[in-house]
Image (cartoon, rainbow, N blue to C red):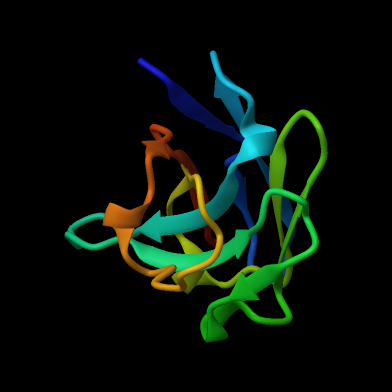
């Protein structure tokens, strides 16, 4: 089954930074728009964070992470650089891919074709 793989999660102190990576197994990630979500333990829904189109030129951010989180991509992966991390950023972080960037509805998890298993980010002093 085609799947995404997240990596880079870690435990950091408040104010710290991390860079997460998202790669694809068995398909070309470069053909897809890729988004990052996160899910807090005990909550059923995944929070949309940001998305980047296949060319890497169009980006959208959710308000809570604007100015702190940055998305980018190259031929190998899609990256989420997180800065000034806060305790409320503690969550399981997922990347997701969909064939079309257009159409909006970035928050809707049902619009994504592929998901990874997640990587844990813990922010604690």
Q: Which quadrant: the N terminus?
A: top left
Question: What residue is at 42 percent from the left and 20 percent from the top?
Answer: 2
Q: Taking 113 as reference, is 36 above or below it? A: below
Query: Which is more toward the observer, 50 or 88?
Result: 50
Q: In the picture provided, is 7 more to the left or to the right than 91?
A: right
**Residue 27 location (% of width, % of height):** 56, 20
The answer to whether any part of residue 102 appears in the image is yes
**Residue 106 location (% of width, % of height):** 44, 68
**Residue 115 location (% of width, % of height):** 40, 37
Question: What residue is at 38 percent from the left and 32 percent from the top?
Answer: 117
Q: Taking 7 as reference, is 109 above or below it? A: below
Quarter of the rendering containing residue 74: top right
Query: Which is more toward the observer, 89 or 50?
Result: 50
Q: In the picture provided, is 74 more to the left or to the right than 67?
A: right
The answer to whether any part of residue 8 appears in the image is no
Query: Which is more toward the observer, 75 or 99?
Result: 99
Quarter of the rendering containing residue 105: bottom left
**Residue 52 location (% of width, % of height):** 66, 58
Q: Taking 1 as reference, is 19 above or below it? A: below
Quarter of the rendering containing residue 10: top right
Q: In the picture provided, is 45 more to the left or to the right than 96?
A: left
């Amino acid at each position: 089954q085609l799947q995404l793989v997240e990596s880079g999660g870690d435990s950091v102190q408040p104010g710290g930074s991390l860079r997460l990576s998202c790669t694809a197994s068995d398909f070309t990630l470069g053909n897809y728009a890729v988004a990052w979500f996160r899910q807090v333990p005990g909550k059923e829904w995944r929070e949309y964070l940001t998305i980047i189109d296949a060319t890497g030129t169009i980006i959208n951010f959710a308000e809570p992470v604007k100015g702190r989180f940055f998305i980018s991509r190259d031929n190998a992966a899609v990256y989420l650089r997180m800065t000034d991390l806060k305790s409320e950023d503690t969550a399981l972080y997922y990347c997701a891919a969909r064939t079309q960037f257009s159409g909006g509805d970035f928050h809707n998890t049902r619009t994504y074709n592929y998901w990874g298993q997640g990587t844990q980010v813990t922010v604690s002093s």
